[in-house]
């Protein structure tokens, strides 16, 4: 299978980032432009505000009851850092163990290669349809599109993913991909797209969930191939883990003859015991429950129980380039809980689509540019007020604000042509490093007083970039004299 | 170069010749719950947490499991259920089995979808999180058994109950196919409102024998 | 104690009344205040906008300006957080280990105003009088980077005549975020709108905080709404006494203090 050759993706330390032309890591618009559209959608803002507030409060309650939360968090962070420091060895061990238990391990350099491997494996079974468990990795590489391109029908089985798929929409949240839709909108999608749906379907969540159950039941029972992601892969035992709520994951992991799991290489953990940390951190941070309804683990194949053919696809797709960035590599610690989205004031207003990637919110604002190279997602590191709420709730203590600031610098330093902003900031730096120039500049800023013509605030209509401020807020007229100036003058004359 | 060699090579390049020192993993979090094993506080905690997921717990003496399983099925299926609608794990102790029920065998798993209820044991129960773990051993049954029938009855004995997640993980065999069950199947995908019962069993009943 | 005051570039240029208030408060508490005349900026705006290389010389100027100071106090949580968490990193990344160590050493002696009052001086009652209904916005960097906790509230509770109104959604960011306010003006404004709604719901006359930058943002929005509720820096409230109760407002022209002869630009 040969696709058209996409433009070459950038590299970091010579390591390729996620290739262009495939997958869902790059948006069509810059964040400010996409956010502007979203901010005008009152219904979207109401849906998001309601949903994020609900889940934020649930999380705070169940985290609050764990006395050793900070110790667990520190252990989670240390475990991830220790794993990354020997990622190659852990992956080799995982491969050995999975293979020893009857599974087959495949390695994929990027999205194209992973899609090719999975497509080949599905075609080899002779089936024309697959059922899927919600998986960020397969969304990232646009696996559904790749399978559909060769005529394989794909059924997303997570309720929210089903809503997104039937609505021909895009996911906007890591945990709750249809968070931007309210019950009435979901009812409309189901009534329009599910064949044979009860015409009396109301927008009551229970009824909608039952409609999905009925719609998917038959597909689960006839499915021959399932595709999943993995939350964790234990190197020492070859045990894979899927954490879920609805039971659609269990259906996919249990009933078909063939299971294909696509796992990012950063999802490996060294030992079984490590799950005692992550299975406490993840559910409370993610759904705000003490434990999610279902967690399934399996090692290779088990005779008489579940799929008898198991394939594990280990995906790079830019992750090694992230690993090469000593500051940014902490983003690989993410366990995809989405707590940072739910507390982020920017996400809450702009919504997930504004980020243009399957990874929205604060983690997306660092992970997407790290995976693609910062220039392919240059507006994302700036899509944050650096308020730090994300860092505070992150179960593995990823210092997202510091990585955002680091990526801003990577972007600035990657510019080959000098921008107007760079000219201004360089000039200002020169001035702020030299007290004499600084005092002169401060005096010059008082020229603004001329614009105000005696009023307390400057006029609203000023040229960019000041207009970015004055469109919605007043700017005070600069005073006649600075503090340091006055103080120095007074204390000199007093002596 | 194979993809395997290339990805491993990239990792080595990324980490550099002199790798960062591996940080110590300090496991100073709680390794055990505060309640003594098999004690009433521990069992009460399990009951509280399981019921919080809107599952039902029926407590009984060890000798009364059989009758209590039948009572659980009365609740889950309504009185007058037919024994043939109930399928049990092959290794379930004989005196726990409702008389005349179906014992799972190596039939195609999808046939289990025709049954109304299943009865299994568990391997471990974690009190703090209200979690039951089934490990595919004969008394727990294969994974499809606890998945396809709409009503699931799990029998837990006091010695299987641990306080927290670390104790639970320590008791489990990672080479077996494990299913950790915390309440009935549920979703919060519509406006974050929890709805019990999507694809897995919509009714979960726990018989706690102590 | 001899205290060196770091006014910050924003306060020095745009709201000098905040620095005057800080100085008079510390003097009233019996401390000698010095204002190193070569101070300019901590470098935060450059670092946070991506100009970390350019920030090195700004950090160097800051370190030079305050060299030898026993204790440095600043009425800005955000700038103190940058001094604590960014300055040394910026120098170290640029390969200037000497500057990095000097910056670290200086950071150890640099305090945010409320932390200095409560933790170093051990006072919560600073003898202030401020007969107004006030609500307090805990700015993000004070809250999450410096972890000032309830120190500002403890100080405010001791102010005579002051009625403290709890701010709903207090810990939500106001949407300032430095250049974020301009680069993502629409999202910033949406955040500001919600913050202002919460402030106005308290029916407070005054919204206060420990950062002049966030107050300029909130105050600029309130002023545009002609809301009546004004923003006043925590230092100005704590500096007020029965003799001088007129609050300065950061969105009004920073008129010269009555005691200072007017200077025309």
Image (cartoon, coloured by chain):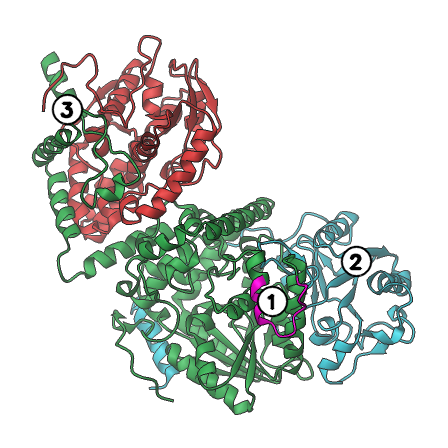
Residue A205, x across and y down, in percent:
64, 58
Q: Chain of mark 1?
A: A
Residue C229, x across and y down, in percent:
38, 25
Whether label 3 touches label 2, CB < 8 Å: no
| Mark 1 residue element | helix
| Mark 3 residue element | loop
Q: Chain of mark 2?
A: B
Residue A66, above or below A14: above
Question: Chain A is which colour?
Answer: green
The N terminus of chain C is located in which quarter?
top left
Residue B191, above or below A358: above
Q: Are dots 2 and 1 on a single chain?
A: no
Tell me what residue is drawn at x 77 percent, y 54 percent. B38
Quarter of the image holding residue A440? top left
The label number, if any, that marks residue A191 in the structure image? 1
Q: Nearer the viewer, mark 3 or mark 2?
A: 3
The C terminus of chain C is located in which quarter?
top left
Q: Kindly report the distance in space between the C-alpha atoms of the residues bearing marks 3 and 2.
A: 79 Å
| Range drawn in magenta | A188-201
The answer to whether residue A252 is left or right of residue A146 is right
Instruction: Name the residue carrying label 3.
Output: A480
Q: Chain of mark 3?
A: A
Q: Are dots 1 and 3 on a single chain?
A: yes
Question: Chain B is which colour?
Answer: cyan
Instruction: Name the residue carrying label 2.
Output: B158
Q: Are dots 3 and 2 on a single chain?
A: no
Tell me what residue is drawn at x 25 percent, y 22 percent. C17
Q: Residues within 10 Å of mark 3 (few under 14, many from 20)?
A: many
Q: Residues within 10 Å of mark 2 (few under 14, many from 20)?
A: some
Residue B176 visible within the image: no
What is the letter of the red chain? C
Q: Earlier in the sequence, mark 1 or mark 3?
A: 1
């Amino acid at each position: 299978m040969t696709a058209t050759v996409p433009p070459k993706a950038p590299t970091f330390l010579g390591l390729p980032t996620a290739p262009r032309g495939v997958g869902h890591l790059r948006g069509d618009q810059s964040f400010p432009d996409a956010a502007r559209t979203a901010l005008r959608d009152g219904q979207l803002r109401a849906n998001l505000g309601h949903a994020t507030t609900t889940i934020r409060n649930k999380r705070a309650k169940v985290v609050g009851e764990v006395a050793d939360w900070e110790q667990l968090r520190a252990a989670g962070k240390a475990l991830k850092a220790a794993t990354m420091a020997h990622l190659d060895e852990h992956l080799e061990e995982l491969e050995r163990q999975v293979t020893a238990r009857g599974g087959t391990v495949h390695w994929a350099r990027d999205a194209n290669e992973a899609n090719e491997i999975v497509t080949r494996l599905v075609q080899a079974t002779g089936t024309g349809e697959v059922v899927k468990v919600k998986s960020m990795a397969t969304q990232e590489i646009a696996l559904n599109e790749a399978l559909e391109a060769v005529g394989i029908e794909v059924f997303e089985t997570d309720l929210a993913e089903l809503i997104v798929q039937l609505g021909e929409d895009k996911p906007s949240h890591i945990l709750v991909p249809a968070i931007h839709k309210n019950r009435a909108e979901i009812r409309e999608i189901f009534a329009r797209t599910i064949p044979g749906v009860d015409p009396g379907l109301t927008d009551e969540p229970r009824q909608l969930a039952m409609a999905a159950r009925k719609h998917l039941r038959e597909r689960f029972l006839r499915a021959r191939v399932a595709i999943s992601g993995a939350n964790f892969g234990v190197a020492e035992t070859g045990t894979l883990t899927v954490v879920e709520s609805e039971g659609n994951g269990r259906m996919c992991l249990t009933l078909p003859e063939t299971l294909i799991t696509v796992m990012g290489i950063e999802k490996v953990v060294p030992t079984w015991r490590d799950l005692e940390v992550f299975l406490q951190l993840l559910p409370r941070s993610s759904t705000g429950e003490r434990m999610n309804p279902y967690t399934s683990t399996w090692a290779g194949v088990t005779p008489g129980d579940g799929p008898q053919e198991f394939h594990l696809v280990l995906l790079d797709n830019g992750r090694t380039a992230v690993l090469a960035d000593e500051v940014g590599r902490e983003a690989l610690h993410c366990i995809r809980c989405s707590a940072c989205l739910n507390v982020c004031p920017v996400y809450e207003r702009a919504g997930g689509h504004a980020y243009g990637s399957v990874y929205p919110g604060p983690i997306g604002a660092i992970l997407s540019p790290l995976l693609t190279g910062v220039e392919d997602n240059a507006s994302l590191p700036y899509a944050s007020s650096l308020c730090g709420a994300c860092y505070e709730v992150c179960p593995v203590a990823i210092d997202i604000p510091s990585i955002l600031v680091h990526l801003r610098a990577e972007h600035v330093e990657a510019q080959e042509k000098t921008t107007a902003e760079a000219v201004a900031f360089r000039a200002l730096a020169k001035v702020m490093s030299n007290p004499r120039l600084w005092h002169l500049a401060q005096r010059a800023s008082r020229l603004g007083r001329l614009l105000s013509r005696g009023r307390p605030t400057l006029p609203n209509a000023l040229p960019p970039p000041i207009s970015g401020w004055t469109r919605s807020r007043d700017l005070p007229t600069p005073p006649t004299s600075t503090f340091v100036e006055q103080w120095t003058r007074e204390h000199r004359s007093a002596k | 170069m194979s993809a395997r060699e290339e990805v491993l090579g990239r990792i080595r390049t990324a980490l550099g010749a002199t790798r960062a020192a591996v940080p110590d993993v300090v496991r100073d979090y709680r390794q055990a719950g505060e309640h003594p094993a098999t004690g009433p506080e521990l069992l009460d905690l399990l009951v509280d947490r399981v019921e919080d997921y809107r599952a039902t717990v029926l407590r009984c003496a060890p000798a009364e499991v059989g009758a209590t399983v039948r009572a659980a099925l009365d609740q889950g299926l309504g009185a007058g259920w037919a024994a043939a609608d109930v399928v049990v794990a092959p290794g379930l102790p004989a005196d726990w089995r409702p008389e005349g029920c179906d014992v799972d065998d190596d039939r195609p798993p999808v046939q289990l979808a025709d049954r109304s209820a299943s009865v299994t044991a568990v391997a471990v129960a974690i009190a703090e999180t209200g979690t039951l773990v089934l490990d595919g051993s004969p008394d727990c049954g294969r994974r499809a058994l606890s998945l396809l029938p709409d009503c699931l009855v799990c029998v837990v004995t006091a010695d299987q109950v641990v306080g927290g997640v670390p104790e639970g993980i320590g008791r489990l065999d990672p080479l077996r196919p494990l299913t950790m069950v915390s309440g009935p199947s549920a979703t919060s995908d519509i406006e974050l409102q929890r709805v019990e019962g999507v694809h897995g069993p919509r009714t979960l009943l726990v018989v706690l024998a102590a | 104690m001899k205290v060196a005051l770091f006014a910050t570039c924003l306060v020095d240029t745009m709201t000098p009344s905040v620095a005057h208030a800080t100085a008079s408060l510390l003097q009233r508490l019996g401390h000698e205040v010095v204002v190193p005349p070569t101070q300019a900026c901590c470098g935060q705006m450059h670092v946070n906008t991506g100009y970390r290389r350019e920030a090195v010389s700004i950090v160097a100027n800051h370190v030079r300006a305050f060299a030898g100071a026993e204790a440095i106090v600043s009425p800005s949580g955000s700038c103190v957080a940058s001094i604590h968490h960014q300055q040394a990193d910026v120098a170290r990344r640029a390969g200037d280990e000497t500057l990095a160590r000097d910056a670290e050493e200086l950071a150890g002696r640099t305090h945010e105003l409320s932390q200095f009052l409560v933790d170093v001086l051990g006072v919560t009652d600073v003898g202030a009088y401020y007969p107004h209904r006030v609500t307090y916005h805990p700015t993000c960097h004070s809250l999450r980077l410096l972890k000032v906790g309830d120190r500002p509230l403890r100080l405010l509770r001791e102010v005579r005549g002051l009625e403290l109104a709890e701010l709903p959604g207090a810990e939500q960011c106001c949407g300032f975020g430095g250049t974020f306010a301009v680069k993502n003006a629409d999202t910033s404004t949406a955040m500001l709108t919600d913050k202002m709604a919460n402030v106005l719901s308290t029916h407070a006359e005054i919204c206060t905080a420990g950062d002049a930058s966030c107050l300029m943002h909130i105050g600029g929005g309130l002023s545009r709404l002609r809301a009546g509720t004004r923003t006043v820096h925590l230092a100005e409230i704590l500096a007020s006494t029965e003799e001088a109760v007129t609050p300065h407002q950061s969105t009004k022209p920073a008129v010269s203090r009555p005691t200072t002869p007017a200077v025309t630009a």
